[in-house]
Image (tube, rainbow, N blue to C red):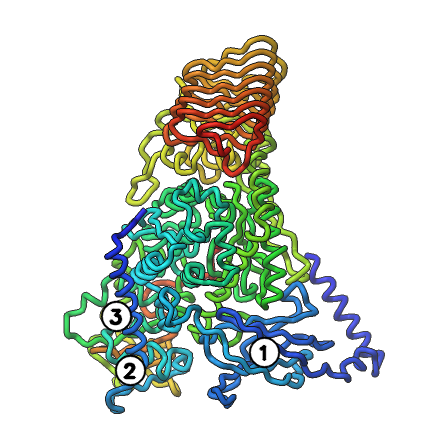
Amino acid sequence: MRRPRPTLIAVSTLITVTLTTAPTPANAQRAAPPDQVTALTAHQADGYTTLAWQPVDGATDYQIERTPVDAHNTPTGAPTIVGIWRPNRQINQQAPTFADAGYHPGDTFQWRVRARAGTTEQPYSDPVTATTTAPWGNPATPGEQLRTQWETTHAAQYTSDTDEYAYTTAIDTLSDRVRVVELGRTVHNRPINMLVIGYPTPAATPEAIAATAPVAINCNVHGNEPGDREACLIMARQLAFSTDPRITDLLSHTTVLIVPTINGDGRANNTRGNSTGQDLNRDYSLIRQPETTAYIKMVRDYRPVAGYDGHEFGNTRAGDLPMLPPRHQNVAQPIFDQSQDMIEGHMYAKGAEAGWWACPYGCEGGGNVGLSEETILRNTLGLKNVTNSLLELRSSGGQTRPDEGNTANNRRRKTYSALWTFHQFLDYHRADRADILTSRAESIEIQAANTGRLVFRGSRPIPAHPAPHPGDSPPPLDAPRADLILDNAPCAYKLTDEQYNGARTDGPAGVGTTVAQRIAAHGWKVIKTGDGYYVPLNQPERGLIPLLLDTQGVEKLTDGERVYPTLTGRRNGPLVVSGFTCAANATINGPVTVQTGAALVATATTISGPVSATRAAGVLLADTTVNGPLQITNTTDAISIIDVTIAGPVNLSANTTGTDVPLLAGNTIRGPLNCTANSTAPTNLGIANIVHGPRTSQCAAL
Amino acid sequence: MSHPSRALRLLAVALLLTTAGCTATSTTDAKPPTSTSAPQVTGPLCAALPTGTDPGNPTFLASQPVDEALRWIPTLTTFEAALRTSGTLTDLPTGTGVTILAPSDDAFAATFSEDNWDDLMTHHTDQLRTLLKAHLITGTHSIEDLVADGTATTLDGTTVTLIRTGPTARLADRADTVCADYQATNARIHIINAVLGPLPVTADSTGHRAH
């Protein structure tokens, strides 16, 4: 309701001026028209040309003209206005750049740029002529010569499922850097493949790959938004075969995980959802569908530290490349901040150099989009401590690219802008790897500490960045409603056997996997004691657990029972734990013994004395101090020790948690660390422990 | 983890190279054998579709089966996928000529919300097939012949009026041809800018769901 008023004031001021004055300073300015654009340059990159020029005082906008020419610089087609650049489209408005794209790569063009003052066209700049960069890869070099169906058809066709499989198999065969793994199958049994790319070869196992701080790109979740997928397939070829030192350096410092087509059935049908009509980007928390389950298990096993999720977007007024971080308020602050740094700090700055118009998803009247649903991969990944962003490719040419009535032009602009983004994503990871890992470590410790309120739905605000769109409204605030906030977080959720193991009907064809299977896919610790299944909140994905298990969850799996701490404040003397015991903000003076089949869960607690668990169901300690030795043996269900200071030796041995990996992350151990004969070797989730004594056996590298 | 045998993988590479080679050959050598059979597509959208010797140009498509030809026309992704997945086209008696009034992707986007379209595609095959049959006419008819007749009966039993409006033709008083007279084996394809048939408009003005 604020906006009409300034407009009225402006109109009345204008009337006054017009009535009372003839020659005014404003008129005098108008009499001196802006000049000709000078210093036009054209820089070539994969699928686009960055045009840069000296700005002209008083210009309202600029028109970019492109003319196809032959080798003798003779025009072979009509000059066309292919771009309209306005100063508010990039953060450095004094150095205008425009990424011209959509043409067939390899063709030769002449460009000119002119300013407009209002609608009055100023003289064109001197022309610049250049041959654009041909599709990547020497046609005579094995591997490099591979092309996708989209490339060979000049974007008339998208790459089909069978052509994708043949292409990625060929890359796998011809490059030591690439291994194609199948993550799962779609409802209609199409393979969901992932390219695992490292230099000189990718590490052998998911756990070894996780240790390289991998990055993951989900290329195509909505079947009718295939632009990013084609970029992924081209980039896979570049990463597999390029001898550019930048590429080999990137691949020496991470593993790139590319999932070209999670939704092969929807892609084949050109539908948004999968073959059951389910929008998969509303299913990453619930994982009712096999496609999303495959992706979430991949995140559990390969532990990417950063991600991008590719889409296309219909708002014709938006930027070329709307992006958005994980905004759900349960996402730990460092992950939100790191994601924003990637978007605003890196992508906006690099976008201004390359000439792409980046802005937050939801900018320019984008509508009620970009909210806090944890079912959306952007938020799911954030809750899993992954720095990440959504990427949208504006579907149409919109107001800045008037020559995209030609479908091939439109498709090429989208795909090559995605290719630019994904390369920048890798560069950001390379440059900020240490910060990304620090943010991840801090976030895992914050989440495992189980402090602060829980929010079932609600976003952090996205500030209206001063550029590239001054004066525009930011994405919707999406603050949490009062009835979706839980100030007093429980210690755990307790599920009955029926809730945990009962048959479900929420999957394809009315058959759903059990809650137990979905919790396992997320990788959460579960402890079974005599009276039920407990899912403690002092875990790395604390913010996601209540969204699926609390009765207040908006899109939940079941109504778990909130379990609150049973042990708080000061307690003197020996403690014998039986059943499920939860300590929070407690001071325990005396030795602690966890009995057979019992469970100890503790946060913000100080234990003065040894802690010993033999044949316990579970031991989960976080943000806690143990002044004494810690001995955990023959545990049956779950072990998690995160951000704990232990003044004594730590021994984990003969634990039989099956495939559930014991966590030992971010601890300070003033003594030796020994892990032997555990059914699965413990992991540190990439957060090193400080150990004053020797580390031996299964924990030698932790 | 899928690790196809090395032999299989090499075969896949060979196939891929062969396919790419074929595509290149067919597109560059797709000049008509004689000028008499060169199809003349007409309409305002034609210039924005593959032309000349571009992959998917009208002359090349004239030698293709109709289902393949449809896959080459970049503005028909919605219609093509619907025809293919519903099997509507393969239901036609073999050897029957067919004329296809093919709504563009923009036409579908202006008619159906994404939810509605996904629902039709995944849950209401009969409704979808009826909708598609409203765009098929038995026999191969140029747009000139259809306009000369003034009406045509589509496979769903509806009578569609056709009148000449300047350089294009108007169908059922709601759609215009935007690029008419594509040829394929035993087929004609006329791209139109609105969806025919009885289903209600469900597209909303914002046009796109959130990511």
Same chain for the residues at labels 1 and 3, yes or no?
A: no
The circle on residue A64 is 1
Q: Marks 1/2: CA distance?
A: 34 Å
Q: Are marks 1 and 3 in contact (CB under 8 Å)?
A: no
The residue that disc 2 covers is B30
- Give the residue at x 54% y 65%: A320
The residue that disc 3 covers is B67
Percent position of residue B66, x then y: 24, 73
Extreme left residue here? B94
Same chain for the residues at labels 3 and 2, yes or no?
A: yes
The chain to which mark 1 is attached is A
Q: Marks 3/2: CA distance?
A: 18 Å
**Secondary structure of the residue carrying numbered label 3:** helix
- Give the residue at x 49% y 26%: A492
The answer to which quarter of the image holds residue A508 is top left
- Give the residue at x 55% y 80%: A81
Q: Is residue B150 above or below residue A473?
A: below
What type is the residue that disc 2 sits on?
Ala
Q: Is residue A173 above or below residue A414?
A: above
Q: Is residue A60 left or right of residue B160?
A: right
Q: Is residue A677 above or below residue A365?
A: above
Q: Nearer the viewer, residue A249 or A1?
A: A249
Q: Nearer the viewer, mark 1 or mark 3?
A: 1
Percent position of residue B81, x then y: 31, 64
